[in-house]
Image: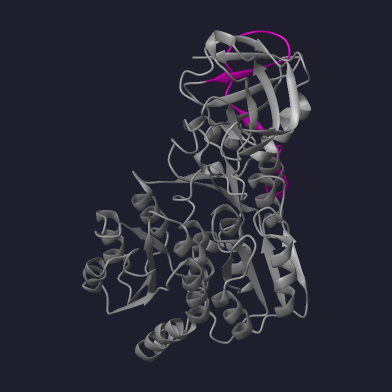
Amino acid sequence: MRNRRTAVLGTFFAAAALALALPTPTASAAEAQGEIVIIGGAAVVSEQLESHLASCTTLPVQRIAGSDRYATAGSIAAHWPSADTVFVATGLNFPDAISAGPAAASADAPILLTKPTSLPAATRSEIQRLSPSRVVLLGETAAISQATADEIATLTTEVVRLGGIDRYDTAAIVSAWAFPSGSDVAYVATGTGFRDALVAGPRAAADGAPILLVEEDSVPDVTRDELVRLGVDRIVIMGSSGVVGTAVEADLAVYAAGGVSRIAGGSRYTTAAAAAIGAPGSRVFVVTGDSFADGLAATPLAGGAPILFVEATELHLPTANTIASRTGSGCEPWALPYPAVGSGKRIIYSNSEQQVWLIDEDENLVDTYLVSGRRWIPYAGTYSVFSKSVNAWAPYGGITMKHMVRFVRPNTWGNKWSYGFHSIPRYSNGTPLQTEAQLGTFRSGGCVRQADHKAVALYNWAPIGTKVIVLP
């Protein structure tokens, strides 16, 4: 692995020495202050949520969006009148673009997205308009084919490809390219999820620091090698010990004489809010926390301004508080009205929408969020919580789940097992059966899967006897 990486680095250092001299960021749109910027269309950040944001601040609220992820990245790039360098990454996965965010910000360069084997019209058009002297391709030919690279080469003077044998190697190669003189600090995030690395982008950009990727329980050799080359004094881990374990934290301490710190929260929203602490100015970027595509190109435009998460129809408390503190507004949590069914303290579960609403005794909406159940199961009707347990087991495969809240008894309409709400199940080796990003889709065998932190909250909120209303 190390020999191959050395060969890759040697090739592009020899062929593109100019690539090492990144320009100083200019006075671009990324330096604008006092604004709420929504990234993505109404399907991912609803018009109602946009109206709520506009109602709770005197600052301008703008939306940057296109017809798809490629056009959205193009709309973000349109904020540059021109660019000497443009980065291009696959739009089908997140790691390559995530690790390049600080590098692109340092180069005052936008990130555009492409399909692996064809260049979308929106991306081609924006490269032509920007007229860069150099395009940096992120990832190997599986991510961006040679045919696509050849097409891009007709639109610019120089094409540089930064790609390794996997996402960890690519992140290290991007770091070596963008920070040839090293860095005092490095940000480290999981390579298996996009959220922590995405909200780390503005902090890393402000610090002039790279983002490197690790596994939950180990540090890849390529990441170790790059930390040594960078000569960092400090390392900042993004995310909780559930995604970057304590063993990795202890391992990383060897490479950071100034210490290892961690930025994390109990959810994607609190982690993003924690990452926003200390950011200059009053500009904030708002993206969906449920998918990666729209946020990929946001870091270069954001600069040091934080990126915060929302759901399509919900503004969570940590995000609302961060917006309020940064803009001086009275922004409050918000969600679309809940279904007008039932009365009293209750849980409403819509099978068709794969969404849950928690309503208290005073008819206040306590929380609403996406889940993963089974189509048409349980049947529509009114139930009640009859049993709870912190730990639960599936009757097959060594699968476990946490914070089970049961509301359908065994042998109800012929079912053998009881059904309830619980955390995302895990195999015996700890691997989850699905990601949080996949919530909102049918994936369960009958129970209702929730994000781990939502499962804990529901377990604590719903005592035995709590009403559960299942909608078709």
Looking at this view, is 457 or 26 the one in front?
457
Q: What residue is at 59 percent from the left and 63 percent from the top?
A: 215
Q: Of 239 and 137, which appears nearest the observer?
A: 239
* 13 displayed left or right of 406: left
- Whether residue 97 sits left or right of residue 11 in the image: it is right
In this picture, is 264 found above or below 455? below
Give 165 or 419, whichever is nearer the viewer. 419
Tell whether position 327 is magenta. Answer: yes
The image shows residue 68 at horizontal and vertical percentages of 35, 45
Please count the marks in the image: 0
User: Can you give x and y, in whole percent of width and height, for residue 306 in the image?
Assistant: 62, 55
Q: Is residue 83 in sight in this rendering? A: no
Q: Which residues are magenta?
A: 324-350
* Colour convention of the picture: one colour
Q: As drawn, is 66 to the left or to the right of 169?
A: left
**Location of residue 314 by image quarter:** top right
Front-lying residue, 448 or 413: 413
Which residue sits at x=52%, y=35%?
312
Q: Position of residue 421 (x, y in %)?
A: 64, 27
- Residue drawn at point x = 47 percent, y = 30 percent: 442
Magenta stretch containing residue 429, yes or no? no
Q: Position of residue 270 (x, y in %)?
A: 70, 47
Is 86 above or below relative to 9? above
Residue 293, placed above or below residue 279: above
Tell me if I can see residue 430 in this picture. yes
State whether residue 115 is above or below residue 43. Answer: below
* Quarter of the figure with residue 369: top right
